[in-house]
Image (tube, rainbow, N blue to C red):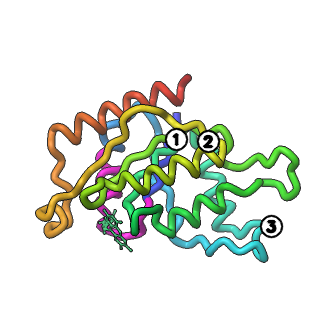
Amino acid sequence: MRILMIIGSLRTGSFNRQIAERAMEIIGNRADVSILDYHDIPFMNQDIEYPAPDSIQHVRKDVLDADGIWIFSPEYNYSIPGVLKNLLDWLSRPLVKGDPERRTAMTGKAVTLSGAGGRSGASNARKRLSELLLFMKARQMEGEETSVALTPEEFSSDTVAFSDELLAKLGDQAERFLKFIAE
Ligand SMILES: Cc1cc2nc3c(=O)[nH]c(=O)nc-3n(C[C@H](O)[C@H](O)[C@H](O)COP(=O)(O)O)c2cc1C
């Protein structure tokens, strides 16, 4: 089983990346897990949409090869960070120009969401991501999402403090997602 993690932040020390990496350890050998590298994709521009640029073909292949996608995202101004929205805009487009079924790399794909941010724990971004993924016809897992409201200490140390509660939540979400993918 393959799980592709998508981080909604390009920041090297990203809290969301730290959490994704911990989730990867928790999943262990129960799945083949990797983190999508999409730092080099262009801004969506319909002038260059077909044929899709090489960088877009690479990310689409990684998404198509995955059985499940786990998104870890911060919240920017109550919403989805622009880099992630841009990636999802590319992934929302038909693989084949003019395809009447409009099949995309995300059609029917199993997805789950988590996020770390300020007081809201990035929950506003996840609400918008849920709407977007529904519109994109992804297959989204229901139930609790791991939501991390970072403390001032975590912000100043740039390090996530993994409490037992957070590790249990990640473990539970991983467990449920592995089952959901297999359904
Ligand atoms: C442009 C911008 C907008 C932000 N807006 C919000 C916000 O609306 N809510 C929030 O909780 N944090 C907000 N933040 C703070 C982020 O939660 C914080 O920078 C976090 O560390 C980003 O996640 P990362 O560590 O995974 O990169 C914002 C940060 C940036 C750069």
Residue to which mark 3 is pinned: 51
Left or right of 152 in this view: 127: right
Residue to which mark 2 is pinned: 138
Q: Which amino acid does label 2 sit on?
A: Ala
Spot occupied by residue 29 in the image (x, y as percentages of width and height): 39, 34
- Gap in angstroms between the C-alphas marked 3 and 1: 27 Å
- Gap in angstroms between the C-alphas marked 2 and 3: 23 Å
Within 10 Å of disc 1 (Cα), the crowding (few <14, some 14-19, many 20+) is many
Within 10 Å of disc 3 (Cα), the crowding (few <14, some 14-19, many 20+) is few
Q: Earlier in the sequence, mark 3 or mark 1?
A: 3
Q: Quadrant of the C terminus?
A: top right
- Gap in angstroms between the C-alphas marked 2 and 1: 7 Å
Spot occupied by residue 143 in the image (x, y as percentages of width and height): 41, 32
Q: At 53% across and 65% down in the image, what residue appears?
A: 38
Residue to which mark 1 is pinned: 111
- In the image, residue 101 sits, relative to residue 160, either above or below, namely above
Q: What element carries label 1?
A: strand
Does the beta carbon at disc 3 come under 8 Å from ligand 1? no
Q: In which quarter of the image is residue 17?
A: bottom left
* Badge number at residue 135: none
Q: At 14% across and 69% down in the image, what residue appears?
A: 156
Magenta region: 8-22
Query: In terms of depth relative to the viewer, which is nearer, 46 or 60?
Result: 46
Mark 2 and mark 1 residues within 8 Å of each other at the beta carbon: yes
Q: What residue type is labelled 3?
A: Pro
